[in-house]
Image (tube, rainbow, N blue to C red):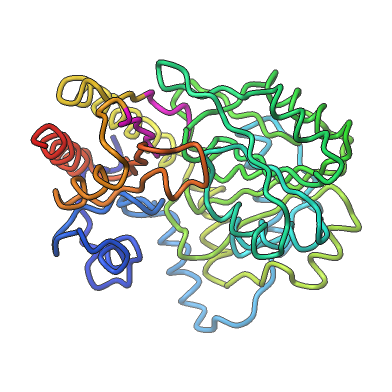
Amino acid sequence: MKYDFDQIVDRSNTHSMKYEAGRSGNPCLPEHYIPLWVADMDFACAPQILDAMHRRLDRHILGYSLLGNDGKRSVSRWMSRRFGWDVPPEQVIFSSGVVPALFAAVEHLSAPGDAVLLMTPAYHPFNDALRRYGRTPLYSRLIETESGRYEIDFDDFEAKVKRADCKLFFLCNPQNPTGRVFTEAELRRIGEICFANGVFVVSDEIHADLTRVGQRHIPFAKLFPKEKRIITCTSPSKSFNIAGNNHSHLIVPDEHIRREWDTNVYCSMPTALGIDAAMAAYDEAEDWLEELRAYLDGNFTMMAGLLAEKLPKAVFHVPEGTYLGWVNLAPLGLPEQKLKELVSRAGVFVQFGEDFVDNGDCHMRVNAACPRSVLKEALERICDALNAY
């Protein structure tokens, strides 16, 4: 490989949430623990991105900035090259992150008394957004198969979309935390049900670039090119480990919504460094991403083998997308709080089902985006702790 993903980068004293916030929320953790929770990576950023940021610093001023046409064209080229999706550059607007976009969507695309639909288990800010604005939460539970793969319960999904108060659906694809990459047939059925019932779809596709090698991500909006009731949320932040730049993109086909959101700055403004980093990621660092995907595949292969050998009762299906492993520990017969305590006291910080809204009891989410030696040590600690109880 051209890039060294086995390198251990010292993140101490860097104001890292992943490394410095764990013990404040989890008192069972020892002083030195392995953090495999929040979704950022422990890999050095692509050198092309760092070089672009250095060049920007050499211009000496970091003033108020705008996502210009060059930045929008960069996003458009990426979508065309990676996914065969022709996105007019003028449909691209800025957001400081997907989470701010979710909150803005609930506030501006629904009204008090409306219901918002999620598939669960789900990324908790989806739920936080609708609760902040007093919307009614609707949960359609994904069905876990014996192998650990999740399927959509379309009967339940359609029944909830058809409710008169359901106005908005948050799609997450690739799905966090289950790792599903939904098929074209699934996405078409989702869209047909939603649009036939007047439900707006906000599609979080932040993990789109992080599929297993050979897997195919299909942008939801690509399948409905004439439909205006879609906002697609995407970003180089997960793919290239630059989440701290707070830089995402929204693809908004409805001109009125796009103009309103952009004019009123619903989702903040970009930074000078964030713009240049995003453009360098999309325009210069694709080879880094391809090596990363292959390395992550290797991490998950190792993880599957280790769990099968040392914790055979656990159910783990290699995720089709994301760098997050979702492991079912329910067959061990322990309550979730006991599982969390044992894993934490072993010196590993992962997230459990309680953090994923609904339908995740006794599951843990493991961030596998770290050097393989670190992931192996963490998994061995987990297995030893659970086996010893």
Q: Give residue 44's quadrant in the image.
A: bottom left
Q: Position of residue 274 (x, y in %)?
A: 54, 65
Looking at the picture, how far across and down is residue 148, in whole percent? 41, 22
**Residue at the (25%, 65%) spot, across then down:** 23
**Residue 306: horizontal and vertical position, in percent?**
19, 26
Horizontal side, residue 191 vs residue 117: left or right? right
> Which residue appears at 48% of the width and 46% of the height?
356
The one of 94 and 19 positioned closer to us in this rendering: 19
Nearest the eye: 105 or 120: 120
Q: Quadrant of the C terminus?
A: top left
93 displayed left or right of 207:
right
Q: Nearer the viewer, residue 318 or 369?
A: 318
Asked if residue 185 is positioned above or below residue 127 in the image, the reply reads above
The stretch in magenta equals 317-330
Q: Residue at x 77, y 46 (%)?
A: 168
Residue at image position (29%, 71%) is: 14
Is residue 374 a member of the stretch shown in magenta?
A: no
Q: Residue furthest left?
A: 388
Residue 324 drawn in magenta:
yes
Determine whether 179 is above or below 275 in the image: above
**Residue 175, above or below 301:** below
Left or right: residue 16 versus residue 384 is: right
Is 154 left or right of 291, judged from the image as shown? right
Q: Give the quadrant of residue 381.
A: top left
Quadrant in the picture for the N terminus = top left
Residue 37 x %, y %:
34, 51
